[in-house]
């Protein structure tokens, strides 16, 4: 049963994740699980992972819409990697459910360290804009998809910090297209993990709704604030 205090902390946690996503982009959603466990007070790490996976999927789907309208998504490449990754995410989340919750949290701390290191690396590769699905990159997309999907499902994270470089290495596409295309996989992996965890009763649905509302509201507000600042500076009003 979700208490009033947990609901308020859930909104606060979602706001914090939304703020971090607005600042650093991919990778910010990895904060969801530790916030749900240590701030909101979700007693089961498995419930925290299942709940955060739904929030990650919803956030990715919302962000995907704008990238799709801008034509940044390489759909065929993204769908191949996502389809293979869904299999990996199902297997990874099944293994994750079978592992002791405290041990899972310890492993989660390790993956957070890896994420922090990867986020320090630059993303200045130019890439080839005309990249398309081909016989050469198809096997790579499938292989990378299985691997990153398994990790995403195991930890209940978006996995964008792994999916983006996987897309670049498999196809040579520019970073912008890789970031946009990765959102297809993040949403697919998150929904797969959520479904698997929900089957075992490991999703707190009311908390997930609060988390998603706060996350997307703050993220949208940050984007709007930056847009207003850019417009003011461009028009010479400041």
Image (cartoon, rainbow, N blue to C red):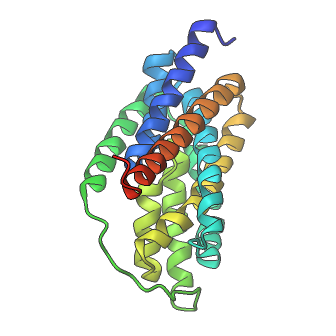
Residue 24 to residue 234: above or below: above
The answer to whether residue 3 shows anywhere in this view is: yes
Relative horizontal placement of residue 150, taking residue 16 as reference (left or right) = right
Closest to the observer: 35 or 195? Answer: 35
Q: Residue at the far right: name it.
A: 199
State the image quarter where residue 208 is shown: top right
- On the image, the x and y values in percent for residue 180 come to 53, 65
The answer to whether residue 203 shows anywhere in this view is: no
Q: Residue at the far top: name it.
A: 4
Relative horizontal placement of residue 190, taking residue 141 as reference (left or right) = right
Residue 81 to residue 140: above or below: above
State the image quarter where residue 168 is shown: bottom left
Relative horizontal placement of residue 229, taking residue 80 as reference (left or right) = left
* Residue plotted at (71% across, 35% down): 198
Closest to the observer: 236 or 33? Answer: 236
State the image quarter where residue 78 is shown: bottom right
Query: Which quarter of the rendering shows the N terminus?
Result: top right
Closest to the observer: 200 or 74? Answer: 74
- On the image, the x and y values in percent for residue 190 come to 61, 48
- On the image, the x and y values in percent for residue 100 come to 49, 29
**Number of disc labels:** 0
Closest to the observer: 28 or 224? Answer: 224
- On the image, the x and y values in percent for residue 181 come to 56, 67
* Residue plotted at (42% across, 82% down): 172
* Residue plotted at (41% across, 56% down): 235
Residue 236 to residue 72: above or below: above
* Residue plotted at (38% across, 38% down): 107
């Amino acid at each position: 049963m979700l208490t009033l205090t947990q609901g308020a902390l859930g909104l606060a946690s979602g706001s914090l994740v939304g703020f971090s996503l607005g600042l650093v982009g991919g990778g910010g959603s990895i904060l969801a699980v530790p916030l749900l466990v240590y701030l909101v007070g979700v007693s089961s790490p498995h419930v925290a992972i299942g709940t955060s996976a739904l929030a990650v999927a919803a956030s990715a789907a919302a962000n995907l819409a704008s990238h799709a309208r801008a034509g940044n998504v390489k759909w065929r490449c993204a769908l191949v990697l996502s389809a293979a990754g869904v299999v990996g995410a199902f297997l990874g989340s099944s293994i994750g459910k079978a592992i002791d919750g405290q041990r899972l949290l310890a492993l989660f701390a390790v993956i957070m360290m890896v994420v922090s290191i990867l986020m320090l690396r630059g993303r200045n590769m130019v890439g080839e804009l005309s990249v398309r699905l081909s016989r050469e990159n198809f096997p790579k997309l499938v292989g990378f998809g299985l691997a990153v999907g398994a990790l995403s499902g195991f930890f209940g994270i978006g996995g964008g910090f792994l999916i983006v470089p996987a897309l670049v290495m498999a196809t040579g596409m520019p970073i912008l297209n890789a970031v946009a295309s990765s959102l297809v996989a993040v949403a697919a992996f998150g929904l797969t993990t959520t479904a698997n965890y929900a089957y075992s009763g490991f999703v707190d649905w009311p908390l997930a709704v609060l988390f998603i509302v706060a996350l997307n509201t703050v993220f949208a507000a940050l984007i709007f604030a930056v847009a207003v600042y850019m417009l003011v500076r461009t028009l010479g009003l400041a």
